[in-house]
Amino acid sequence: MPFVSLDQLTTARVQWLWPGRLPIGYLTIFDGDPGIGKSLLTLDLAARITTGRPFPEGTAASAPASVIILNAEDGGSGVISGRLQAAGADLSRVQIFDREVGEAFLRLPGHLPRLEEAIVRKQVRYVVIDPILGYLDERVQPACDPSVRAALAPLAELAARHGCAIQMIRHLNKGVGTKALYRGLYSIGFIASCRLAWLAGRDPKLSNRYVLTQPKNNFDTPASSLAYAIEADSSGQARIVWQGDCPVNENDLLAGTPERRQLRMRVQDFLLDFLKDGPRSTREIWPAAQELGLAHTTVNRAKQELRIVATYFHRGLPDQTSFWVLPSQAITTEVSDNPYAANFVRDMTNRRHPQTPLD
């Protein structure tokens, strides 16, 4: 190939599937621990792309397009299909690799022509490989940088050749206090082969919230972090609920000792579960916390982080009984089986989350 001077080349502008977050014609990688909704999040995006709905922060999408979901862990006709339906996807625009019994697994880069044929046939714009380690040829050494780069280079060329965004999913390693760029499993060659990277994790201060961050963006300044929750819809299917911009960054997600983060999450999970059916009195909360070995100060700290309101009532209640109320809770007549709940509900009718001192 001859050398050429740059003034003889046309400057190409980056095109985006999701502006600032998913570049067309490039590889991206999505890192995170198990259980934080990586697969579910990509299915939410796939549903938006197949229907042309706006992206989570309100950015307008282009015309509906086809996607390919390669998932080595969840069955296409079961979990994947159910979650995509719940997300409102156009299933006719979703392609999966439906392996028959005895058929070889799809391996990359060896089986790249099969993936390319599917991309061309349906004019696919978004490809998810979940997880990337489940689809690599056996000869690829995931801990060897040259081996990983050589395996991913044809995949990057495929994305550029057909104008699609290819996103690889990867778990984190067990490192602590390491920069986000070095926390993905095995070789740094994975993230080095990508022009843009995502990292998701639990919000370090709120156990029921997750955050999507961008530790690498070779095209522009990193996009803002987005908060999200994982909830079940009326049919019981898990879904992503986006909660807008969030100040937490990738360093925040990985900061602190695992033990401290686990304790914070454990206490918050306890309160969220204990109060999920409605307000409960401190006469119930403290004994339950004590049984789990949770310190008074630790529970109170979690209460403030979750913005739980403590409301006091004196009429008909012994001493100064207080009830703890989650910010998302409405006061109804069926909030609790607590013997004092009837008095609580009567006093709280048409009043949500009164501004009373915290105990």
Image (cartoon, grey):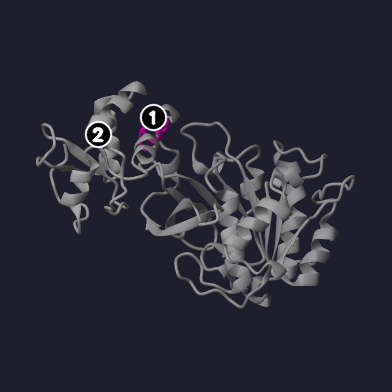
Which quadrant of the structure image shows residue 127? bottom right
Q: Going 54% across and 52% down the picture, which residue do you hit?
A: 236
Residue 126 on image: x %, y %: 66, 64
The local crowd at label 1, few if under 14, some if 14 to 19, many if 20 or more residues have their Cα within 10 Å, is: few
Q: Quadrant of the C terminus?
A: top left
Q: Which residue, given by chain and number where applicable, does mark 1 sit on?
A: 263
* Displayed quadrant of residue 181: top right
Image x and y of residue 311, in percent: 17, 44
Q: Which residues are magenta?
A: 261-268
Q: Earlier in the sequence, mark 1 or mark 2?
A: 1
Q: Describe the element under mark 1 as helix, strand or loop.
A: helix
Label for residue 115?
A: none
Q: Which mark is residue 300?
A: 2
What count of labels does the image hold? 2
Quadrant in the picture for the N terminus = bottom right
Magenta stretch, overall SS: helix
Give amino acid for label 2: Asn
Q: Do callouts 1 and 2 mark residues in contact (Cβ within 8 Å)? A: no
The answer to whether residue 14 of the structure is visible from this angle is: no
Vertical comparison of 160 with 205: above or below: below
Q: Is residue 41 left or right of residue 227?
A: right
Q: Residue furthest right?
A: 102
- Left or right: where 179 falls relative to 135: left
Specify whether residue 49 is painted magenta: no
**Label 2: few (<14), some or many (≥20) within 10 Å?**
some
Percent x, y of residue 160: 71, 66
Q: Residue at 37% x, 41% y: name it.
A: 272
Q: Position of residue 345 (x, y in %)?
A: 22, 49
- Is disc 2 placed on a helix, strand or loop? helix
Tell me the kind of residue under disc 1: Leu
Vertical position of residue 84 compared to residue 307: above or below: below
